[in-house]
Amino acid sequence: MQYRHIFFDLDHTLWDFDQNAKEALIELYEVLQLKEAGINDFDAFYKSYLHHNQILWDRYHHGHISGEELKWKRMWRTLLDFKIGSEPLARKMSAAFLERLPDKQHLFPYALEILQYLKDKGYKLHLITNGFEAVQWRKLRNSRLEGYFEEVITSEKSGSVKPNKAIFEYALKLTGAALGESIMIGDNQDADILGALNMGMACVFVNHIGAEAAVNPTYTITHLRELESIL
């Protein structure tokens, strides 16, 4: 095998963040009575959340904000779109959301099957994720992903975030993997793909949403099943 160690991203690659977030936000919308607070359209609320979540994750990737800021400010910015300027409500929403989100179990099609396929072929599987330590472990346990990975490298554990080289260096050291026998698989062209390329690591861009290519990955796929033709 050309590669021995496979490093997966979790959110938006294997674990369907958008679908799981939607379920958690529906619960939040009802429990916190957000309609009565002035948010009359759940779909608009959900769309606004996804928009601000993406922007703030990008800022977090590049070290412009802390993880704690990300957690509540994505809610705060969403509320501002509905002319609700309540930081206490934003923080309450953040806590309630993070309590519910990791219990959701939607995966992308063929996620479990491809992990079993790769494990059966003898690959060593690991995760590199910018997600928060406790939250990511709960996601893994609840969605039946936990048993597939030998090492789980989070930004909190490593002290760095993708796309920084430091988190990839930490992952290689922790797993004992050589750079030339390692490959990164992820959906984020900045954090996962550019991060891997800057490290000199092979990579697979998982383009679930048909995004326009902004970088030049080693491989591009649109469905996890296509990994069988690469690995």
Image: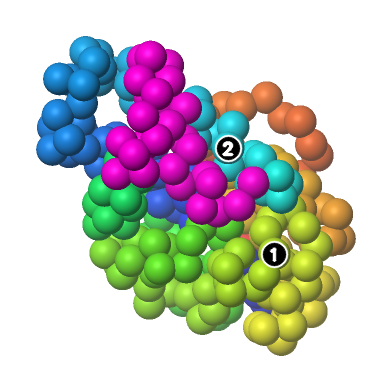
Q: Secondary structure at mark 1?
A: loop
- Residue 56: give its label: 2
Res. 2 visible in picture: no
The main secondary structure of the magenta stretch is helix
- Place of residue 211 in the rendered image (x, y in percent of width and height, measured from the top left): 61, 27
Q: Quadrant of the C terminus?
A: bottom right
Disc 2: CA contacts within 10 A as few (<14), some (14-19) or many (>=20):
many
Q: Residue at x 72, y 76 (%)?
A: 170
Span shown in magenta: 65-92
Q: Quadrant of residue 76?
A: top left
Magenta span contains residue 142: no
Q: Is residue 203 toward the left or the right of residue 68 in the image? A: right
Q: Is residue 37 toward the left or the right of residue 188 in the image? A: left
Kind of residue at badge 1: Ser
> Mark 2 or 1 closer to N-term?
2
Magenta span contains residue 86: yes
Q: Residue at x 30, y 41 (%)?
A: 93
The chosen color scheme is rainbow
Q: Is residue 153 toward the left or the right of residue 217 in the image? A: left
Q: Is residue 32 toward the left or the right of residue 155 in the image? A: left
Q: Nearer the viewer, residue 140 or 79?
A: 79
Kind of residue at badge 2: Leu
Q: Is residue 224 above or below residue 50?
A: below
Between the C-alphas of marks 2 and 1, the distance is 17 Å
- Residue 160: give its label: 1
Q: Is residue 213 above or below residue 174?
A: above
Q: Quadrant of residue 39?
A: top left
- Place of residue 209 in the rendered image (x, y in percent of width and height, measured from the top left): 52, 30
Asked whether disc 2 touches disc 1, contact meaning CB atoms under 8 Å apart, the reply is no
